[in-house]
């Protein structure tokens, strides 16, 4: 387009806009001309400029503008189907303009390298650089930031150009808001070898960045982006002083989002319903927008014959509370009433939405098991005799955060509801073929497990498990003839390299705890090794000294390092191993903070239910009470504000919690596999002031953490698949065991799957009676051969897991499997629980003698080298309960000390013994011990102890140096020796060895 036709006062190409309106809307033009005569063009341009200035380019392109009460369009977008030739002709009439070296300002003679326009309205600007002349994409970015005044009308947010590209021969970056030096450009690259960047042209004919103009800026593509991708995201945020502000962001799709949505849409158009698609997109991929775009496009998708592909699109989130960001995103794409409905009340609301055929429904998975009951109620209210079944419609189900729970019973309920009357008809046909007409419900239960011809699943996840890959994955070639591979992938590596998430392993410090326990009782009872070891580990974890020392390390680190990050706004999370540990850490944190006077640090705690501490038997702790009366729903917003800095958690906020201000994580819990990735990834959200993250880990091994992340860094791979023959082998073993009989299974099934119209109140009693004989046989076996009973229980669970999994992958038509699966599902809940062995409480029998917390490693955990482990499917059944042989408590303590003990030598022990003996010989100290409680005695003793160390410094220079230079070591030794000396004075004992023995 000729750059001379650009109007510097109105900032568009007026003659192009007028020519488009005149050619495509002659009736409107004629009417306006009859009103305005020779001033028609002037009036149209005046109103167009006004609407562009006040409503923005995107709104005017989509909705047109008013001129003397008439609506004029400045663009026509591609219709969803080809049934209206007039719409197709209007779309073909769009005039796409390309202008080189455009002068855009009245104040200077600066020129833009490239401007793309739609019917005269500028929508895209670009600065183009050539690395071979020493100019790169970085120079283009700097040019936008320094030389392109964002106050120029062409660059004003929303009002004219919508997106700005910085391009060279290697990379592309883009932004939708120019703001001088504060302008933030995002990568718009394809990705290369699983990471950032772009691959070379496979044909060797063009630049790495040729996809930008050949694919993205291509006429149909750009118009499609303007019509159905770009949107103005509006969100309310609360400032630090509590004020609510409204923020607008113009969203332009990132390359992987554009590619994923279009590829999924094209596959659905070609394949139709009844197929599965796994989208493995890392955190930081912009998943909410991708799901929103996909939902709207699938809702209006037509196939090559102009038939609608899906009747409804259902977006499923596994969170009990619907993801608000996801809701808001989907709503912003569609403002027409009735197109989108969120199910935030109950299952009745879901049943009504499914019955009326709402195009896009957002719901949790947990509401589907109750839909049939609600459909019956709705039919009853209408005075109809319904069967609780929907008419079969074609559905696209988009699953947010797909993982193994979507392959359980609740997911089969969803399939049953959406399968509708066709599923019922198929079940009736199976039942007739098997000569079991009264067992339609059984065959429905079988049919709902497999794929439904009317349902397509689109499963999104950053961390797929084996089940996710098996159920939703595809073949390696991207077709539906296979499994185990994602349809589309955006890796953790690429998200980190492109700067969309932080590398949470870049600064990772591990500590080790060394300690020595002693048997403080006269008795040396025999104990069951495994249970006693767990009790001793719990004793150590919950020991006040352990919690106090770790609390000091964490609070002092937060105060010295974390507190100053992100402009003083940084937050930290403490991940604890149990609810009781969370309670004790909360109390310890608050006490230490008060003691040190760190008034700028305040804590919150998160755990479910009530916790009782055996040290305070009359008190129950709750999250609500410990947080000063703060409701659970208020906690995330409160933690995001300026009043709280540290959040202590026990099995909460370790998944799905996004807080960009979270900088540091203190880990005092065993993490492994996917849990390690999900927990530590709470730190990865970006913030303009966030330069790094930090992890301090008291428990886990660096190599194990590295391997957990490596499994997902370059994308998950499916490992060994479950063997269907294994399931039949386990079934044969269960059948042969004699715990249940075939007749008992059939009696139970006959009642459980009885047609609804023949059900009665006595059915529950009959089902229990059919199970009770097996329960008694199991109890007898448990009494005589406990290990055999637990092995049988393990086989029962293995069969259930294998069938629940394999029945979704392999279309079984074996009703015996479904019968046994249903019977065992209910039998397992009635089997008596195993006795896990004796419970031990060693608070009075065991004493902590030595304790040392030592930093053992720090620095980055690199994920660049090596390969991740494939994710294997269900394996052989375990052997159940295994009793450990008994061992003397003292021997168990010795073995734990060998593993976790300090590196004190005999010489070190002798040195400490001499220090204690010297203190015992001080008569004034003895008087002080007799006259004061332990706390006051410790204060008096600490000053003397330093003198005792100095007098004996030549006897053990290593211990002396640590005592004088390591504050934490000095505090530990002072506290320990003070307690020993005080106890000796008060009890009259003569040697420390008496305590140890």
Image (cartoon, rainbow, N blue to C red):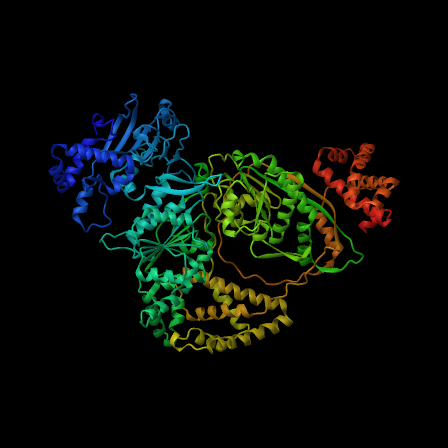
Residue 947 visible in rendering:
yes
Residue 738 visible to an observer of this rendering: no
Q: Quadrant of the N terminus?
A: top left
Q: Is residue 693 above or below residue 311?
A: above
Give me the residue at 53% from left, 66% from top: 796
Q: Nearer the viewer, residue 625 or 166?
A: 625
Residue at 38% across / 66% down in the picture? 374
397 or 365: nearer the viewer:
365
Whole-percent x, y for residue 185 in the image: 39, 33
**Front residue of 957 and 944:** 944
Instruction: Left or right? Give the position of 985 relative to 758.
Output: right
Q: Position of residue 379 (x, y in %)?
A: 33, 69
Report the number of discs: 0
In the depicted structure, whether residue 782 falls above or below residue 180 = below
Up-down relation of residue 433 to residue 259 (above or below): below
Q: Position of residue 372 (x, y in %)?
A: 38, 66
Nearer to us in this view, 143 or 883: 143
């Amino acid at each position: 387009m000729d750059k001379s036709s650009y109007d510097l006062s109105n900032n568009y190409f007026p003659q192009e806009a007028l020519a488009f309106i005149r050619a495509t809307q002659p009736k409107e033009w004629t009417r306006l001309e009859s009103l305005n005569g020779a001033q028609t063009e002037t009036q149209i341009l005046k109103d167009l400029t006004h609407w562009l200035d006040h409503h923005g380019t995107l709104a005017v392109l989509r909705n047109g503008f008013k001129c003397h009460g008439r609506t004029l369009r400045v663009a026509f977008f591609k219709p969803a189907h080809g049934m209206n030739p007039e719409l197709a002709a209007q779309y073909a009439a769009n005039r796409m303009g390309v202008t080189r070296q455009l002068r855009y300002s009245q104040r200077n003679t600066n020129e833009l390298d490239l401007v793309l326009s739609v019917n005269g309205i500028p929508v895209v600007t670009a600065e183009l650089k050539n690395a071979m002349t020493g100019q790169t994409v970085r120079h283009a970015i700097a040019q936008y930031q320094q030389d392109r005044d964002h106050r120029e009308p062409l660059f004003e947010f929303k009002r004219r150009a919508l997106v700005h590209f910085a391009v060279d021969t290697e990379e592309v970056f883009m932004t939708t808001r120019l703001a001088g030096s504060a302008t933030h450009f995002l990568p718009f690259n394809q990705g290369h070898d699983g990471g950032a960047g772009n691959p070379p042209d496979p044909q060797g004919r063009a630049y790495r960045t040729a996809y930008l103009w050949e694919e993205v800026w291509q006429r149909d593509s750009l118009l499609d982006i303007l019509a159905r991708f770009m949107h103005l995201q509006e969100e309310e945020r609360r400032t630090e002083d509590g004020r609510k502000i409204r923020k607008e962001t113009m969203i332009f799709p990132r390359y992987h989002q554009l590619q994923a949505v279009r590829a999924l849409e094209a596959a659905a158009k070609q394949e139709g319903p009844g197929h599965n698609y796994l989208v493995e997109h890392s955190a930081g991929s912009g998943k909410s927008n991708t799901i929103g775009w996909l939902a709207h496009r699938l809702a209006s998708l037509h196939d090559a014959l102009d038939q609608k592909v899906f009747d409804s699109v259902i977006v499923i989130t596994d969170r009990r509370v619907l993801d608000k960001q996801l809701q808001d995103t989907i709503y912003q794409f569609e403002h027409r009433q009735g197109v989108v409905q969120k199910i935030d009340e109950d299952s009745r609301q879901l049943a009504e939405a499914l019955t009326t055929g709402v195009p896009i429904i957002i719901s949790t998975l947990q509401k589907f098991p109750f839909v049939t009951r609600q459909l019956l109620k709705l039919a009853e209210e209408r005075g109809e005799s319904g069967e609780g079944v929907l008419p079969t419609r074609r559905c696209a189900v988009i699953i947010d955060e797909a993982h193994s729970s979507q392959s359980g019973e609740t997911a089969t309920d969803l399939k049953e509801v959406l399968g509708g009357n066709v599923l019922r008809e198929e079940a009736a046909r199976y039942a007739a073929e098997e000569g079991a007409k009264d067992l339609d419900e059984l065959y429905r239960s079988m049919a709902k497990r497999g794929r439904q011809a009317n349902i397509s699943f689109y499963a999104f996840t950053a961390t797929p498990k084996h089940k996710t890959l098996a159920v939703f994955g595809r073949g390696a070639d991207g077709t539906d003839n296979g499994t185990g591979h994602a349809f589309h992938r955006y890796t953790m590596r690429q998200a980190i390299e492109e700067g969309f998430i932080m590398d949470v392993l870049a600064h990772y410090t591990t500590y080790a705890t060394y300690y020595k326990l002693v048997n403080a009782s006269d008795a040396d009872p025999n104990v069951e090794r495994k249970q006693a070891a767990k009790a001793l580990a719990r004793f150590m974890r919950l020991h006040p000294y352990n919690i106090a020392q770790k609390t000091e390390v964490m609070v002092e680190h937060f105060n010295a390092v974390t507190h100053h990050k992100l402009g003083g706004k940084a937050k930290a999370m403490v991940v604890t191993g149990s609810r009781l540990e969370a309670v004790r850490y909360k109390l310890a944190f608050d006490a230490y903070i008060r003691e040190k006077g760190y008034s700028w640090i305040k804590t919150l705690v998160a755990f479910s239910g009530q916790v009782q501490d055996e040290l305070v038997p009359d008190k129950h702790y709750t999250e609500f009470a410990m947080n000063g009366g703060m409701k659970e729903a208020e906690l995330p917003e409160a933690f995001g504000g300026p009043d709280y800095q540290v959040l202590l958690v026990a099995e909460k906020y370790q998944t799905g919690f996004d807080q960009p201000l979270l900088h540091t994580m203190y880990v005092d819990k065993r993490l492994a596999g996917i849990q390690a990735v999900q927990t530590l990834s709470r730190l990865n959200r970006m913030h303009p002031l966030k330069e790094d993250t930090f992890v301090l880990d008291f428990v886990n091994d660096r190599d194990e953490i590295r391997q957990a992340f490596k499994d997902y860094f370059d994308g998950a791979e499916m490992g060994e698949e479950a063997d269907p023959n294994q399931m039949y082998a386990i079934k044969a073993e269960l059948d042969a065991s004699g715990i249940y009989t075939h007749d008992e299974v059939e009696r139970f099934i006959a009642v459980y799957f009885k047609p609804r119209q023949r059900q009665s109140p006595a059915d529950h009693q009959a089902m229990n009676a059919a199970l009770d004989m097996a329960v008694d046989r199991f109890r007898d076996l448990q009494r005589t051969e406990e290990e055999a009973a637990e092995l049988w229980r393990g086989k029962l669970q293995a069969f259930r897991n294998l069938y629940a999994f394999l029945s979704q992958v392999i279309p079984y038509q074996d009703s015996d499997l479904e019968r046994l699966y249903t019977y065992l599902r209910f039998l397992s809940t009635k089997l008596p629980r195993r006795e896990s062995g004796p419970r031990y409480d060693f608070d009075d029998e065991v004493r902590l003698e030595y304790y040392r917390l030592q930093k053992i490693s720090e620095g980055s955990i690199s994920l660049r080298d090596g390969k991740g482990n494939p994710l294997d499917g269900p394996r052989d059944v375990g052997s159940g309960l295994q009793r450990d042989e008994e061992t003397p408590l003292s021997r168990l303590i010795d073995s734990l000390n060998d593993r976790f003990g300090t590196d004190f030598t005999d010489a070190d022990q002798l040195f400490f013994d001499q220090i204690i003996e010297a203190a015992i010989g001080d008569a004034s100290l003895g008087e002080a011990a007799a006259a004061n409680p332990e706390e006051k005695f410790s204060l008096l003793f600490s000053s003397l102890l330093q003198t005792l160390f100095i007098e004996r410094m030549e006897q053990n220079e290593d211990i002396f140096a640590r005592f004088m230079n390591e504050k934490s070591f000095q505090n530990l030794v002072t506290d320990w020796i003070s307690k020993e000396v005080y106890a000796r004075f008060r009890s009259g004992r003569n040697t420390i060895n008496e305590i140890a023995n």
